[in-house]
Amino acid sequence: LFLYANNHIKPLQDFKENIASIYSDDGITFYCGLWNGDLLVYNYKSNTGKVVDIGFTNSAVLSVLKYDANSLIAGSFGEGLRILDLETLQPKVDHGNLFSSYEINTIKKLENTLWIATETGVLTYDVSTQKTREYRHSKSENFELPQDNISDIYIDTLHNKIWAATRLGLAAYDKTTDRFKFVEEPKILKNKWITDIALDKRGNMWLNMNNNSIAKYDVNTKTANIYNVMSGNRLDIF
């Protein structure tokens, strides 16, 4: 774990765990998913932390999200997700281990529903009703995900869309049909392995791609520019 302050980056010497993901909603308490399946809880003000066993045996925790004032959600790459009691950091009895065999990349929340990006499609889970839904690439069911390896999900409240990043391009969820639709324009995004999605304050989408490139996508005009970042890392994230 490293800290940036006063124009310098310094390591926090007491915490040398291999970190796979970081989440904080207040800038004070940081929940760090570890590659071994544990969770590091770090307090910035006191510079203290602890490693917690949250029930995964050996799967990286790639996504951590606070669901409400009492619940924390952790998603693993191979053992599904856990809904944890925020005070004890132990799985809640009424939910248990969800999607136990799934490889989860990202979890996002929209109202009561979790949108989950996995290596085998998009999952939704309504925490209040415990109902699930799965979206996969299937011509017979007309789910228009270009393929099922979903790297990221982005809840876009500005354009009222839910985006899915895949290895063959971008897809958008259509609420009226309850389907994902493949984004065919602009064509320069087609067949691109998109790993991450972000939105700037002007409404432009920024897409990280697994070829040392970043795309700036204008949702309204359906145009895009691709920039080569020459980082040398094929799986940069932002």
Image: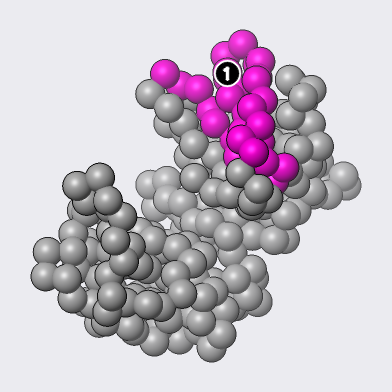
Q: Residue at x 31, y 55 (%)?
A: 9
Residue farthest toward the top in the current orientation of the protein? 221
Q: Which residue is mark 1?
A: 218
* Image quadrant where residue 224 sits: top right
Q: Residue at x 66, y 48 (%)?
A: 232
> Is 223 part of what is drawn in magenta?
yes
Q: Please report the bounds of the magenta region as a residue range.
A: 202-230
Q: Would residue 22 appear left or right of 236 to someone viewing this image? A: left
Residue 76: percent from left, percent from top: 54, 72
In this rendering, is residue 120 above or below 77? above
Residue 205: percent from left, percent from top: 53, 28
Residue 204: percent from left, percent from top: 50, 22
Q: At label 1, which amino acid type do we have?
A: Asp
Residue 190: percent from left, percent from top: 79, 31
Q: Is disc 1 placed on a helix, strand or loop?
A: strand
Q: Residue at x 58, y 20 (%)?
A: 219
Colouring: one colour
Q: Would residue 12 appear left or right of 221 to someone viewing this image? A: left
Q: Is residue 3 visible?
A: yes
Q: Residue at x 53, y 88 (%)?
A: 57
In this rendering, is residue 202 above or below 29? above
Task: Report how many numbered discs are placed on residues in the image.
Answer: 1
Q: Nearer the viewer, residue 9 or 187?
A: 9
Q: Would residue 163 appear left or right of 238 to someone viewing this image? A: right
